[in-house]
Amino acid sequence: MANLRLRSAKQFEIDTRGRPLSPLTKGAQGGASDGVDTAARWLFGILPELALAGYALHAIVTRHTVLIGRGGRLHLHGPEAVSLGIALLALAAFGHFRYFWEEHPKLSAYAEAGNLISLLAMAGGIVFTVIKVLVWN
């Protein structure tokens, strides 16, 4: 019979605030001066957020956006499109705070406040959009 051994659960490395290190953190041997993979920080904390922010700003400026779903397309115009654009912009800010600021040694102290503010703005934009589309339309 094969020799079966139980392995202990993988131990996670802990950062200075007592949280498990994120997948972006490379540790002291990572080669980056601050111990974080700068390319991954930019890949996950800047590029997708720029694309999302671009679409959000387009919705805000043109006051028109389209949502595609299983039931077809929903065209939003006016305040509905602007509020959804604000919610998408807040989502982009949340991703930036989460994947860029939290991994930065100097900005990580401010990341939680940014996350909270962006989540509140996103919730407000979504609630306004849903109420405006379902109730006042």
Image (tube, grey):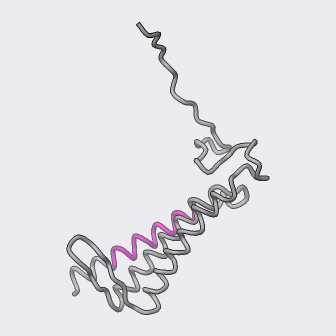
Residue 63 lies, with reference to residue 13, above or below; the image says below
**Nearer to us in this view, 86 or 73:** 73
Q: Would residue 29 appear left or right of 48 to someone viewing this image?
A: right
Q: Nearer the viewer, residue 60 or 136?
A: 60
Q: Give yes or no for residue 106 being in the magenta stretch.
A: no
Q: Residue at x 32, y 78 (%)?
A: 67
Looking at the rendering, in which quadrant would you find the N terminus?
A: top left
Toward which corner of the image does residue 77 lie, by quadrant? bottom left
Q: Is residue 123 rendered magenta in the image?
A: yes
Q: Residue furthest toward the top? A: 1
How many marks on residues? 0
| Residues drawn in magenta | 111-128
Residue 18 pos. (x, y %): 62, 41
Q: Position of residue 42 (x, y in %)?
A: 64, 63
The single residue placed furthest to the front in the displayed view is: 1
Which residue is found at the position 27% from the left and 72% from the top?
69
> Residue at 52% across / 75% down in the picture?
51
Q: Kindly indicate the quadrant of the structure image that contains residue 13.
A: top right
Left or right of residue 46, residue 107 in this image: right
The residue lying furthest to the right in this view is: 33
Locate residue 124, reporting x and y percent: 40, 74
Image location (x, y in percent) of residue 26: 68, 46
Q: Quadrant of residue 96?
A: bottom right
Quadrant in the picture for the C terminus: bottom left
Give the overall secondary structure of the magenta segment.
helix
